[in-house]
Amino acid sequence: MNKREFLKGAIVFFPAGGALAALARQAMGKETGSAPAKDANGKKGYDPASHFYGMGVDIDKCIGCNRCAVACKAENDVPDEPFYFRTWVERYTIARDGEVVVENISLGARETTTQDAREIIRTFFVPKLCNHCQNPPCVQVCPVNATFTTADGAVIVDAERCIGCRYCIQACPYGARYLHPTTKTADKCTFCYHRLVKGLQPACVEVCPTQARIFGDLKSRASRLVRFRRLNKIHVLKPQLNTEPKVYYANLDGEVR
């Protein structure tokens, strides 16, 4: 299936390179001096200070269909070549002897395990992406301030400022960044920021058939994400690093890193 057909017309194509960063800075009223972006109805300015976005993932609901990764590539014009992902899905296979096999099914690893099925006690899927940390190490190490955090909680890369030094890629503890093969600048998940300012959901959330991904505003009591965090035992990846991730997992196995 053609990946752009996959979203069935729901795609809002992302502004390339530094244009996305300009959109984020404009939404915050920075640098441009222009009015903030309009909301989904175009009736009033989008105020990023009124929002604080995060994402929830219910591990028990993820079926490993990989639609999120396909939708993300189509929505954000991510290179088709292997190893380039803004979001991906890992399959964890746990055996009786304690052995844990982790495979990135977004790379096509679907039937590669050689473990005896009788020795497997659990298999589950874990979607991963940029954690949009509240204390992001990638922002701290950037020598030219190309990576920045918006007022509404998204971590964005300004491709027009980025010099491709790879410091942020090395600093990210979640492996969520890569160097774009064409622009030679850092690239990563943006929570589909170009969609957020229009009142839309990220593409990966919109196409998930089991609603394993929950996106919302942490400042809104009516947000599905706030309810998700209240009703579930929540974990984050690598909590010992104190990066304060805003991707929250429910039913996360202790073997996941």
Image: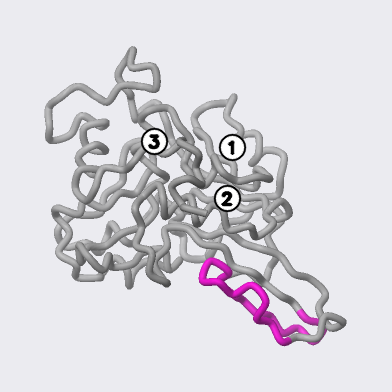
Range shown magenta: 95-114
- Check the picture and name the quadrant holding the C terminus: bottom right
Whole-number angstrom distance, CA of label 2 to CA of label 3: 21 Å
The first of marks 1 and 3 along the sequence is: 3
Position of 245 compared to 99: left or right? left
The first of marks 2 and 3 along the sequence is: 3
Instruction: Find residue 195 and name its label.
Output: 3
Q: In which image quadrant can residue 191 be found?
A: top left
Report if the CB atoms under discs 1 and 3 are less than 8 Å apart.
Answer: no
Q: Nearer the viewer, residue 185 or 231?
A: 185
Q: Amino acid at mark 3?
A: Arg
Q: Determine the secondary structure under disc 2.
A: strand
Give the mark toward the camera: 2 or 3: 3
> Residue visible at 25% across and 70% down?
166
Whole-number angstrom distance, CA of label 1 to CA of label 3: 17 Å
Write down the residue under mark 1.
Answer: 225
The first of marks 2 and 1 along the sequence is: 1
Report if the CB atoms under discs 2 and 3 are less than 8 Å apart.
Answer: no
Q: Residue 215, image x and y in percent? A: 54, 39
Q: Amino acid at mark 2?
A: Tyr
**Placement of 100 over or under 155, stated as above or below:** below
Q: Residue 74, image x and y in percent? A: 41, 51
Write down the residue under mark 2.
Answer: 248
Report if the CB atoms under discs 2 and 1 are less than 8 Å apart.
Answer: yes
Whole-number angstrom distance, CA of label 2 to CA of label 1: 9 Å
> Residue visible at 48% across and 50% down?
71
Q: In which image quadrant can residue 221 be found?
A: top right
Q: Determine the secondary structure under disc 3.
A: helix
Q: Residue 202, image x and y in percent? A: 46, 41
Label tally: 3
**Placement of 117 over or under 200, stated as above or below:** below
